[in-house]
Image (cartoon, rainbow, N blue to C red):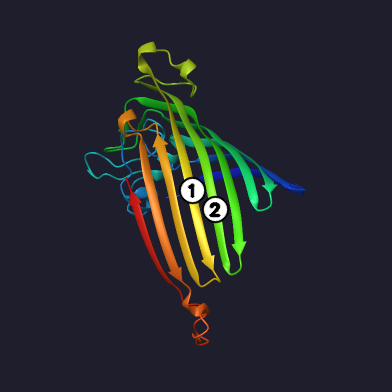
Amino acid sequence: MGPQAYNRYTLNSGVQGKKGRFAWGVKAAYTQSHKGNYGATNGHAVFGGTVTSMLTAIPTMPVYDSGRLGGYGGSDAVKNRAISANVVGINKLVNDYSNRNRMFGNAWGELEIVKNLKYKLNVSYDRTDYKNFHFEPRFDMGYYYLNTQYYMYEQDGHNSTGLVENTLTYQLKAGKHKVDFLAGMTYQEDKNEWIAATAQDTTDLPYQTFGAVSNPSAKGVTSWKGTATLFSLLGRVNYNYEDRYLLTANFRRDGSSRFSPYHRYGNFAGFAAAWNIGNEKFMHLPELISSLKLEGRVRRAG
């Protein structure tokens, strides 16, 4: 099921330029969003989703009932003995939403040191600040949908990813032969931090804030904080002969802080070969076929 309401505002900007042997570019983006979620209680499932529950609701069950706690109708435990959700009441009484603020920035610069030899530095940063909130009061909406305690939950946190890439490329041409070399080093750092609070009690909560909770023992707090890094060395060689015979060899060595120091690094190699049959002089392709290529790949990790 999708959200009840979703508002998002986005701002993007970018600029790039080149002067002599130096080229550069900058991008920035900001997004703010608010999503109102379909009401779902903490301890009572809405079987089949809200739309299904509306279609299968007992026809004699009133939407509103001033005699019940919360003011909304429900199935009778004696006469109906049926689990039938009052979707209107749940969506009105339950307050559930998610807020997101995301900021992304990227900057790169490329310098041609000598002819065909280029060094490129690419830096990016991506951060998201978020808030998830849920509140439901005490209510009585019939058999099964009886809530004797209010429940409130709030989670505030952020996660971010920083990336630095250094690459060196070189192109070599000799007659019908063309070779591209690439060597690089990358570093990525991921951070995630959040704090969450809950409150649950048999009393009424006049305001949906933790400061309004009168019973200190009804509140609880938990948190989490983590950082993970990834360091990589990489290399690649591409060979092209007259756009007919193509060879590629690549290698990278990755080290992740998510693994133990004794098994932190891994080596990954790959090789690919292709024969562009359609570019051979003896080959004449029919009009229905624009290209014909035979490829083979080998990959290995260790």
Q: Which label sits on residue 181?
A: 2
84 relative position to 93: left or right: left
Quick one: 273 or 75, which is closer to the camera? 273
Tell me the kind of residue under disc 1. Answer: Gly
Residue type, label 2: Phe
Task: Identify whether 93 is placed above or below 152.
Answer: below
Residue 22, image quadrant: top right
As drawn, the label of residue 235 is 1
For the C terminus, the image quarter is: top left
Looking at the rendered structure, the secondary structure element under dot 1 is strand
Contact (CB < 8 A) between labels 1 and 2?
yes
User: How many residues crowd mark 1 within 10 Å: few (<14), some (14–19), many (20+)?
Assistant: some
The residue positioned farthest toward the right in the image shown: 19
Give the residue displayed 55% in from the left and 45% down from the top: 6
Q: Residue furthest front?
A: 174
Q: Say whether residue 77 is left or right of residue 234.
A: left
> What residue appears at the point 54 percent right and 50 percent down from the top-left corner?
182
In the image, what residue occupies the spot 43% across and 45% down? Answer: 252
Is there any visible trace of residue 64 in the rendered image? no
Q: How many marks?
A: 2
Label 2 packing within 10 angstroms: few (<14), some (14-19), many (20+):
some
